[in-house]
Each structure stands twice: as structure tokens, then as C-alpha cells.
Amino acid sequence: MFIENINGPADVKKLNTEQLVVLAGEMRQALLSKLSKRGGHFGPNFGMVEATIAMHYVFESPKDKIVYDVSHQSYPHKMLTGRKDAFLYEDHYTDVSGYSNPHESEHDFFTIGHTSTSISLACGLAKARDLKNEQGNVIAVIGDGSLSGGEALEGLDFAKELQSNLIIVVNDNDMSIAENHGGLYSNLKLLRETNGQAECNLFKAMGLDYVYVNEGNNVEDLIAAFTKVKDSKVPVVVHINTQKGKGYEIAEKNKENWHYCAPFDIETGKAKFTDDSIDYSDVTVDYLLDKMKKDNRVVAITAATPTVMGFTEDKRREAGKQFVDVGIAEETAVALASGIAKNGGKPVFGVYSTFVQRTFDQISQDLCIDSNPATIVTFAGSVYGMNDVTHLGLQDIPMLSNIPNLVYIAPTTKEEYLAVLDWSIDQDKYPVAIKLPGGPMISDGKKVTKDFSKLNKYEVTEAGSNVAIIGLGTFYEMGKNAAKLIEEKTGVKPTVINPYYITGIDEDLLEKLKDNHSVVITLEDGILDGGFGEKIARFYGTSDMKVLNYGLKKEFLDRYDVQEVLLKNHLTPEQIAEDVMKIS
């Protein structure tokens, strides 16, 4: 096998064209084996094997700097830059992350997991190179789906200003995670259909030189194209037409389902571990489709992650014009939602917590200043959510809860979520964000009668004395369990409170707790600094009330074990009970 002898790009350069083709097959086989056992980003990586081989054959990494957008296509790059063992041998599978990582290799320059960033980052590398009068190529690799993100277009717009070497490799497989949306894709289609010869050319319009490769999975054609642009004195786009999932027929035919995969059987493509349990995505799509049929003003919005709300291809067809995918553009999603709400529509934007960070300004400026009644549902904003350092969902509480006019609510069960969602869509006074609980969905069957329009009114679910536990969202159940242990140890039943509201405090209730409580505990599924608990602690600042805030330390965690993190942050009922015993 050739791949076993590839310890760096220099070894790639030793192979002839025929051997490089064999190498590509070996790399795909290694990817197939690993991903079938561990899961990961499948389609983008399978489509980029030949292009990655060609880049390392032509360029001189790490002197020539390659920047990968979102990193979903970086696995072949890792295989050719000294990290092949992490793909060849099962006992080394966890040696590398799923994203580019400078801590792993000198061939990676940024830790990247969010999209549309590579061109701007590469522009920065090129600018520094020029300021220092150094030589070398800077290559930004970006997928066609990522071009819909505003930062990608900003980077393209600025690239012309460099007037020096910058090579932008556009990997065009005619797909984002799902199908592409937006006007620029008609131009990419035109360029593909005309072999790059169409007079209307997005990239040339930006002032960039342009090279088209129709056979983007042909090593020889790619080497020729990259050789042509190597050491270019002006910014140039190399537009390559690739096939997402290439080399695995099941993935080639089902591109959306194979963007990312769980462990699967290679022969059938069927997932090895199936979970038929209903989750919040299922609940959301069922509710919204029913709501849409009853009210044509209701519209679901996604920023290129339609299944976060359960909108698979069939569900998107069912929703028709009442489902909108803006592409990888969270900023536009929020501004669009604000405009729809302003003009009498009822928008619901479903988004992973980690991507809410990309649109903080629009939530603040475009939505909340005018209090337009749009709904944002944040998914995976939890210690139980995605655990790669680039996809953490732990910052939404301090980020969103401190924006004026926004009502941020944390339900604890399916029933509470649907009640909040229903109220949010029908009310017309506030922008509302809903923080879904992490972990398995809890459904207790209880009818929710709470009037959510009476803002910042907490709910005492178990009345007690001495100790009050305010368990927000995900950690409400932990609070209940801690209360049981405290009662067992002290004989005194604590008060348990479901606060719901993250953006405000129930001053009347908190004041009343002073009468027969000496300790107040807050629990929140997110970073403590600037979070929910600090609001409670600040309220009691001048009183004799002791306040214990439980949540997560402000840090960048990576591929963590949930139970270890909970233990480290004293987020277990046993630890909480022990802490209370020490001070009460």
C-alpha cells in the first residue's frame, strides 16, 4: 500500500500519476473503514481526495499554507500530513480531531469548525506574508455551500485588494449539507455547464483570475491546474467540479444523508446503532407543519441545517413556501425573521446553539431593538450537546440573556416546550428565544397552564424551607434529585423552583424566600460567567442569603466526557448535597 508509506507531502511527490490514482483508492478505503466504525463527515471528504493529493503534489506545505473552510473536507489532508495512522489503525482513531488543528500538525494553521471563514483567514496570512516580504503560496479551500455565508463573500470581495498570491480552491459539488439555496448557485451551475467559459462569472466580477476544472476528481487535471496557478502574482480562483461522496455508491446517490454519518454497515449503508426515540427535532417539525396548515403566516427558517428542526426532504416539500433555507447565513436568517415578523408573519428560526454566536449582532440590532416578535429555537445548547471545541453550545445563556427586549425561556419537558413555542408564535410583543433541554427528551404528560405572557414569574414545584434550588432547563431534574438527597441527609425538605425565564428574575419570589430560607442554589447548563446564576447572586448581594451557583467553567473543552465535566464542576446531586451540608 502506498498510503502506509506517506509520512508527509514529500512522499506524495515521489509517486507518478498512476500511483496517485491508486493512493486515492487506498485513502477512500481507509476513510470508509474508519467512518463505518466511528462516524464522521463522509461526503465532503470522499469528494476531496484527489484534490487534496494534487495540492500536496504541487504545493510545498507547510511553507505553502493551506486553509480549510469548516474542516469537513480535511480528513484526506490529515492523512497526507503525518497523521495517516489515525485513519489506518483503529487503536489510533481518536488521535486526531475531525477538524483542522494546529496543535496536531504544522500543516494546519487554524482550529476551524464554523463555515465561510477560510478565504478571510487566508487573506490575513497572505497580507502578513507580503508585509514581511516573504514568499510562498496561500491556498484557501472552500466548498460551494460555504460561499453562501457572508464572510465568504466578504473575503472574496477583499481578495482583489491583495494584488498578490492568493489561491482560492472552490470545491463545487452542487451541495451544502442539503441542497444549495441562493442566486449565486445559478451562476455556479452556469459555469459548470459551460466548462467555465460563461461570460457571467461571479469570481471574475470580483476582480479575480479564474481557472475551471471540470473533472474535479481527476488527479492529472487537478495537478495541471494547480501547477498553472502556483506562485501566481494575483489572486486566483480554481473552481473544481467534484462529486460529493465519490467512491461509495450509496453516498453518491444520497448526498444529503451522507454529509455526516454515524457508524454503519459498509455493505448496506445502514446505521449500526438506530435510535427510534422521538426527540425535539421530531416534535418541532410535527408541531410546525400542523401550525402551518392552520396559519399561512407561520414560516420555518433554517441556515443550511434543515434537519435540526426535523425538516427532512419530504417535510420540506410538505411545508412548501412556508419553509425557507437561507444557506449558511445565520445573520440573514435572523434579519429575515425580523422582517417577516415586522410585516405580520410568524417566523421560527431553528439553529444549533454553537451557530447562534455567528448572529449576535443581528439578534441585538436587527431584531431586539424594535422588539419584533420572531421566535428562535436553540438546539444542542448543552453540556450534552456537540463536544468538539469548534461546536460547543455552552455560551448561549450569557450571550442571549443579556440582550434587552429578548425573552429567553428554558423549558424542561416536551410539554413545556410546546406550550412555550405555541405562546411565542401567537404573541406579538417580544422576540423570544427558546433554549431546548439537553440529553434525552423528557415527556411527563402534564398539561401546561402557565401564562408565559406574565414575564419572569418562576414556578415553585416543591415547597420547602431552608434551602431553595432553582434548576434551569436541563438541570431542573438534577435540582430535584439534589433536593431529595438534601432532605435525606437533613430531614428538611428543600424548595424546588422551575424558573423558565433566563432573561429576568422573579423579584417577588426571591424576596419571599428570605423569610424561611438561608441558602439558594442555582443550576444552569452553560458557562457561569455572565450567566443566569449571577443574576440571582446579584439580587441577594446585600442580604444574608448564601448563594451557590452551579454551571460550567469558562473554558474551551474539546472531545470531552460529559460525566467527567459534570464531576469537575460539582454538577452531580451528591456533590451539591455535600456542599449544602458544609454551609447550612
Image (tube, rainbow, N blue to C red):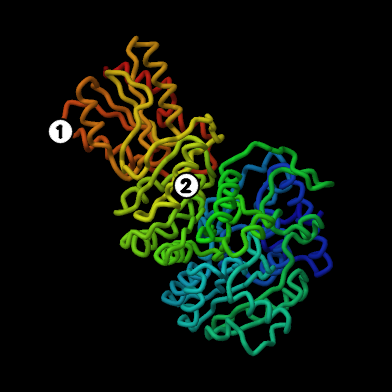
Looking at the rendered image, the quarter that the N terminus falls into is bottom right
- x, y percent for residue 481: 44, 22
**Which numbered tag is attached to residue 9?**
none
Residue at the image position 31 percent from the left and 43 percent from the top: 455
Q: CA distance from mark 1 to mark 2?
A: 39 Å
Quarter of the image for residue 252 reads bottom right
- x, y percent for residue 316: 64, 58
**Nearest to the observer: residue 440 or residue 175:** 440
Looking at the rendered image, the quarter that the C terminus falls into is top left
Q: Which residue is mark 2?
A: 422
Q: Is residue 144 left or right of residue 116?
A: right
Residue 107 seen anywhere in this rendered image of the structure: no
Ranked by sequence position, the earlier of labels 1 and 2 is 2
- x, y percent for residue 351: 51, 53
Q: Amino acid at mark 2?
A: Asp
**Which numbered tag is attached to residue 542?**
1
Residue at the image position 16 percent from the left and 29 percent from the top: 543
Quarter of the image for residue 439 reads top right
